[in-house]
Image (cartoon, grey):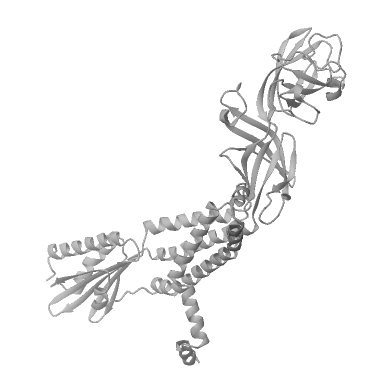
Amino acid sequence: MKESEAGAVGRPGSPLGTIDRILRWLSSLQLGIALMLILIGAAILGTLIPQHTTEAFDRFYARLTPAERALYGHLGLFDVYHSWWFTAAILLFTINLVLCSMDRLPMILRDIREPKASATPLFARSQPLYTVLFTTRGSPEVLELLRPLFARLGWRPRVTAEAPRTTVFGERGAWSRWNFFLVHSSILLILGAAFVSARWGYEGTMILSPGTQTRSLTLPGSRWRGIPERPWPLPFTVRCEALRVDLKNPRGPLVPSNVINWYTDIAIEEGGSERRATVAINRPFDYRGYRFVHAGAGRSGDAHRITLVIRSENGPERLVSIEKNQTVTLPDLGEMRFVRFTGNFRARRSPSLEAEGYEDPAAEVEIVRPSGERRTLWIFSERGANPGIPRDLKDRVGIPVHQGTTDQRAALPGAEIPGYRFALRDFEKVSFEHVLHVRYDPGVTALYVGGALLGLSLLIAFSSSHERVWAVLEPEGSRLTIHLAAHAHRNEDRMQEKFHALARDLERVLAEVPPDQ
């Protein structure tokens, strides 16, 4: 049966012969290099050509002619990482690596389990490193000289006697032959992780304001596919704790040129547990395969923290600093909470709308008196340019206008607290909302592991190799011929230096040590 199968493989038209040729092609180095170039080219195309889920796609798509749109769409260039040819290239490259590893496995196992401990002069001459020495000493004496020389260079000597020759064999770093499989495994892990992320990953945005929470993302639409923006559920809740910003000039405008960094303080709630984090520019946050990245800021006109001046009839002036949605306790007044802020109170048209800029700042606070009475006040800047409250204040904020006060900006009449006056001394500017870009990458952990394994395999490749050396002792009458040969599957230059050192040392000791009588 085996003879018939072997004959069938040899026949050009046999099924086994066809399968063998296909497997040889799939495991060939040429195919592996070609597929690697295709994947690199795909990555370049996916970077240069805006993909249909990116913000730049609409502008790019609008500049194309109908023929270009049809061609790009047919080739899958608008969605490279989900195209059929990219998927096929990854699949073929995976098969190529697996088959190549399977082809190498028997040879590596043979070299490790059954090293060639016995050699002939002909085999020695065929090795990359070879030299020959002559001596009148006997084989036992030369063996005693070779053992310490091998050991000093890191090769464990192993003697095999097959009349009329004797072979001293040494090797080092046989385990490094397995590095081949570590390289292939790490590449397969990286490819698998990239494929999983491309197929089942997604990315979108969320708009957060202090105190808001969400359990969904907004996925971008696709003009090419005719898909509108749509919400996508999250397995956890994201709550915005605060928005902050570092300004070069705190008195300057809230514009990108004056901003050092933006900060979004969030808390993630899942299964009764909570995790807090801060997302900033160049400081993303990773959670269970989700990466949160700062993507932008909304309208200016809000404040993260305010500093209030409280003046009372029976006490000194006090300064109180409160963060948005936070509460401070004052012994005589009660609990004071910073509710909201507007940078341009006069421009407001409704309590639900916020105006941009900081022309007329005002902060809304809520005070719960020790008696339990609840008061809500709008507190204005003591440096404000507009001293009066507009006549339509009643219609806009729903609080009656108090008559007979000289400074109606100190506190909203009708909600003031007798014996106390309030003013807004300072505030920390911030936008009303921040935009976070969120990417779900289910293969990111495997990608990191694959990258670490690949780095480890490269370190092994540069620092180790499987070194083998043979000394074949061949008696020729009264003279002993020593055939020295060596081979290293990697780092040949280092092996060449060690081999020449062995030959020099052996020649020196043969000349220095007197022969036994």
Q: Which of these two is toward me, 15 or 82?
A: 82
- Tally of numbered discs: 0
The quadrant in which residue 138 appears is bottom left
The answer to whether one can see residue 15 in this image is yes
Please give the name of the residue rendered at 26% of the width and 74% of the height, measured from the top-left corner.
Answer: 126
280 horizontally vs 355: left or right: left
| Above or below for 501 versus 343 | below
433 horizontally vs 259: left or right: right
Q: Which of these two is toward me, 13 or 98?
A: 13
Q: Position of residue 515 (x, y in %)?
A: 13, 68
Q: Position of residue 500 (x, y in %)?
A: 22, 62
Position of the C terminus by quadrant: bottom left
The quadrant in which residue 89 appears is bottom right
Please give the name of the residue rendered at 75% of the width and 13% of the height, measured from the top-left corner.
Answer: 387
| Above or below for 96 versus 45 | below
8 horizontally vs 511: left or right: right
Q: Position of residue 99 (x, y in %)?
A: 49, 72
The quadrant in which residue 239 appears is top right
The answer to whether one can see residue 193 in this image is no
Q: Position of residue 213 (x, y in %)?
A: 74, 40
Please give the name of the residue rendered at 69% of the width and 21% of the height, measured from the top-left corner.
Answer: 359
Q: Which of these two is toward me, 404 or 261?
A: 404
| Above or below for 252 versus 214 | above
Q: Which of these two is toward me, 367 or 488?
A: 367
